[in-house]
Image (cartoon, coloured by chain):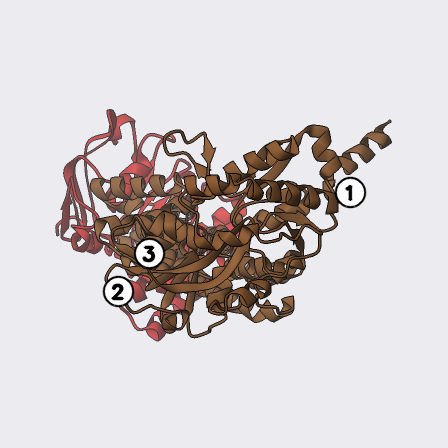
Amino acid sequence: MPKRFLFTLLFLSCPAFAQPHDSWPHILDTGELRWCADISGGAPYVFPNEKNPKQIIGFEVDLMEAVGKELHVQPRLVLGPWEDLVPMLLRGDCDTVVNGLEITSERQKVIDFSIPYYYFTEQITARKGDNRFKRLEDLRGHRVGTLAASLAEDILKKDSAITTVPYPSPVESYRDLELGRLDAALFDGPIAAWYAAPNPNLANVGEPVGQSSYGAGFQKDSPILRRKMNEALTQIIRSGEIEKIYRRWNLWTPLQSMLSSPADVSGEPINDGSRLTTRRDDVIKVRRIQKPWFHFIPLLIQGAGMTILISCLSMALAVVGGFLLCFGKLYGGGPARVICNSYIEVVRGTPLLIQLYLLYYGLPNLGIQLNAFVAATLGMGFNYAAYEAEIYRAGLLSVPKGQSDAARSIGMTRNQTLWHIILPQAMRTILPPSTNDFIALFKDTSLVSIITVTELTKAYSTAATTTYRFLELGLVTAALYFAMSYPLSVWSRAMENKRHAAFH
Amino acid sequence: MPPFIEIRSLTKRYGDHLVIDRLSIDIQEGEMVIFQGPSGIGKSTFLRCLTALEPFQEGTIKVGGVQVHAGMDEDRDHALILSLRQQMGYVFQFFNLFPHLTVLENLTIGPIKVLNKPENEASEDALKLLKRVGLEQKARQYPSALSGGQQQRVAIARALAMKPRAILFDEPTSSLDPDMKKEIIQVIEEFRKDRLTMLIVTHEPDFVRRIASRVVTFKQFGRIS
């Protein structure tokens, strides 16, 4: 009995292996079609209703309602970060991805697509009055924001003269464009129409860049589900239902006439771009970067360099800040004590992520603009200073009072006592937890990717979402982190032993 | 000749708790005075007040012409406090050697940092002192490698390295076994030859009574007889 129970548990915990790839029978069983999407910065695709945030709306929500009606199943939304939607699909968290997923040949190596349900071009956005950018080439030599792991990012990255700055959602990117941290932004047409067009400080400029289409993504080898979905989409397109939906969202463009051209419902992979280029000669043929995964290792090493740089600078800041806070708390007068104590409590009591957001996106409201690297270093340093301060305080207090009595009795000043007698002894207590903190800081630098710094974790996520080699690149990334942190802990242990041997 | 140490109306309170009430005493240069009495009566507190390790509430202390009064601040009045402390070395019950420094460095750190002596001069003086306490071969060792008696001998040498005119002993033998107590008595006798003024606080006065010039008995509130 226990054996059978274990087996069942194993079976349940590995849905990817347990289920047949084609989940159509399962969908019929449950009456639910699980589709995944990201709602953060997700307008007009899938996003929370401003008037009632519990309600999720968007043109893809309407589309899936219509599909559900055709297929006589209930669509159920599964949420996840946009870069992770395909991995979620592969893991079996959902049956399909319907969230502005561009049909590209690189993705088709990993997943299958439905027929296109929306055609679009990429849109350049600049600050109002800035007329420099007419075409993609005009972006050379400029900082351009875009959505991480999107087709637009690939288009930009093909040209090494363009500095590409990937963001997790469009909102921050357009904000940085307004603030002058970016020169331009490149996003899918619907995003630019929704977020940039109504913004009085921004303008969508220049010719359309590239052309692609969105399709629903499925796990490979799910022919029935895919056929059913294609039939449903075809029906919605023919009946005019899709035009109604897109017009309701102000997304109907002349390009959408391509939807009703003979649809490919055979179940064969759809070739992106090429079919379209023959129809319109003026659009740039879009090809995904196709490189084997190990070609991304230099990118990872570059990211590791940034990780080391930010770690070392912010740790130096944390050590200096930590000592100042600690001395202020232990030896300062009333006001200094209150200030240092409040700082420590507030910083330790709020998440680092919020602090980074406030520094980078919040301070500009007060007219203080930090670039991403400076904000990341200050954010990490200020945060860890609070933790260091408490370690130093505990270390200083661990030195017996007799030591300062003895130092004072031979005439040392308080500063001399602290510097020559207390601190050297406290270091033994301080060093191990402080090194631990450094190792933790070092790994916490992965958080600064949210304010557009490309360190190791960000480099990994970029490489992995391009190649879908999450395992191989993940192991390389973990190995890089370990190679950097292990010497630290060895060093810390050696220091500890050395001091230990010396005087105890 | 005026007395070397003049204490007038010394009063020490911990909050509302009165420990020493208007204690006055004179001590001549070269005297060796033993302060005896039960534990917790305030003998050690008296000694700590004398060298300003402990703040006191009323009275004046005058040592070798340096006069300090109640309500001093360690930082603000450091020059005055330093000249007071330079008159008197201090030996603690639990030695309080600096564990991160070698025996030699324990002796030289004061002369180098406080008296600004050159390092080689400080080392030479320190080695001479170590020889007198019989520990010159331990100069490069850390205190943890020494026995209790040896540590206390180093502590005495450390106090003397500052060349004080008096030395204050706070229960110097209480944490030592009988053999080690003897080592300390020998060292104290050795330095008596220099006519060094000595104040010894102890609750077991018998071990030094025979070489003392005066025995003062502490009673409640610092009354003495």
The tint chain A carries is brown
Task: Give the amino acid at mark 3.
Answer: Asp
Residue B63 lies, with reference to residue A133, above or below; the image says above
The tint chain B carries is red
Question: In the rendered view, does A431 fall on the left or right side of B109?
Answer: right
Is residue A405 visible in the rendered structure shown here?
no
> Do badges 1 and 3 share one subunit?
yes
Chain under label 3? A
The earlier-in-sequence mark between 3 and 2 is 2
Question: In the rendered view, does B54 fall on the left or right side of A170?
Answer: left
Mark 3 highlights which residue? A176
Mark 1 highlights which residue? A20
Mark 2 highlights which residue? A130
The numbered mark at residue A281 is none
Which of the 4 image quarters holds residue B158? bottom left
Which SS class for mark 2?
A: loop
Chain under label 1? A
